Amino acid sequence: MTNPPLRVAVAGCGDVARKHHLPNWKELVSEGRVTLAAVCDADPERSTQARQEFNAAKAFTSYESMLAEGAYDVIDICTQNRLHCPMTLEALKHGANVLVEKPMAMNVTEARQMVKAAEKASGKLMVAHHKRFEEGAEQLKSVVEAGELGQIYTAKSLWLRRRGIPGWGRFHIAEESLGGALIDIGVHMLDLCIWLMGSPKPVAASGKVYRMFGDRPDLVNADWGVPYDVSEFNVEDFATAFLRFENGITLSAEFAWAANIPEETWGISILGDKGGIANPPLGVYGSEYGCLTRKAFDWIPDEEGHRGEIRHFTECIEHDRPVRVQPLESLRIQEIIEAIYESSQKDAEVRLQ
């Protein structure tokens, strides 16, 4: 017996929703697996435009009104960070499954509230860490789970833009987003790297964040050439950190919206006593038969991360399976980020519970 299509509502119709979420929900609509029951945005023009562009049944400017008027199977939250927690809590109360954009919340207290609410709710909760669904991620995870790395002891994670401060949205305002490069792009790479490592328990963080470029009107900083109000910029544009985990495992990280480097670069590497993995270049590195070796992936399935995460979340609801990104894992990432900010402020290592 075929299940009826899932009723989906998308909260927030900015760039993230229009470019990465709504097109993938529309694809699932064409497959008969979901219906786009509603879109919502505080800006009436954006809400109406999204309804028309993606053939949503209704458009709202009030999240509360949207929840009150309909019963939804899925609420996809693509709003600014400060709304992630309150919107998630309300959606779970209404019995919906919730996909919420990263970061999980503005702070650890909110993230813990979300975890507790999800444990009590009938619906599933997943944070949209789309890097876990990009091409190569599943293959590297399989390598680790097969034990090819042996004892993992250290890792590196980075994403450095030469210039790429988001000029759209309100990412540059602490009251809206908490922080800058660390919580915007750093959260992606930390989640991916720690997940591939097997999600070891973090025990301490030492870090420093810097604001060197974003509040300077004499520089061209905005991502995609879209300007922002420089006078509002009050978050970091560079972050560096050193993390300690149980069993002596360590991770070093660097993230930047703006830095004087030759070109944008990103990647992860994880080292074990039998082998190591990296991306880029995607591969497994080690030694056999008295030689240094490398295992390259000549072909891997083509997958875009946002598409993968949305299809995965849909399948988990359809077949009542556990989601790949567990709320407790996202809570740990939030704890790490908060500890890095605290360490930067105190100029000292911060222990995690």
Image (cartoon, helix red, strand yellow):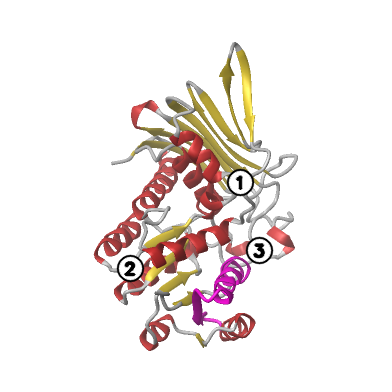
Mark number displayed over residue 256: 1
Q: Earlier in the sequence, mark 1 or mark 3?
A: 3
Nearer the observer, disc 1 or disc 2? 2
Mark earlier in primary sequence (3, 2):
2
Query: Residue 224 sits in which quadrant?
Result: bottom right
Quadrant of res 296 = top right
x and y percentages locating residue 97 in the rendered image: 38, 69
Q: Nearer the viewer, residue 203 or 5?
A: 5
- In the picture, the quarter occupied by the C terminus is top left
Quarter where residue 226 is shown: bottom right
> Residue beneath label 2, please?
123
Query: Disc 3 marks which residue?
Result: 167
Tell me the amino acid under the disc marked 2: Gly
Q: Residues within 10 Å of mark 3 (few under 14, many from 20)?
A: some
Q: Amino acid at mark 1?
A: Ala
Residue at mark 1 to residue at mark 3: CA–CA distance:
15 Å
| Element at label 1 | strand
Q: Nearer the viewer, residue 137 or 271?
A: 137
39 falls in the magenta region: yes
Q: Which mark is residue 194?
A: none
Distance (Cα) linking label 1 and label 2 = 36 Å
Q: Position of residue 300 (x, y in %)?
A: 63, 45
Image point 61% across, 80% down: which residue? 54
Q: Amino acid at mark 3?
A: Gly
Outermost residue to the left: 120
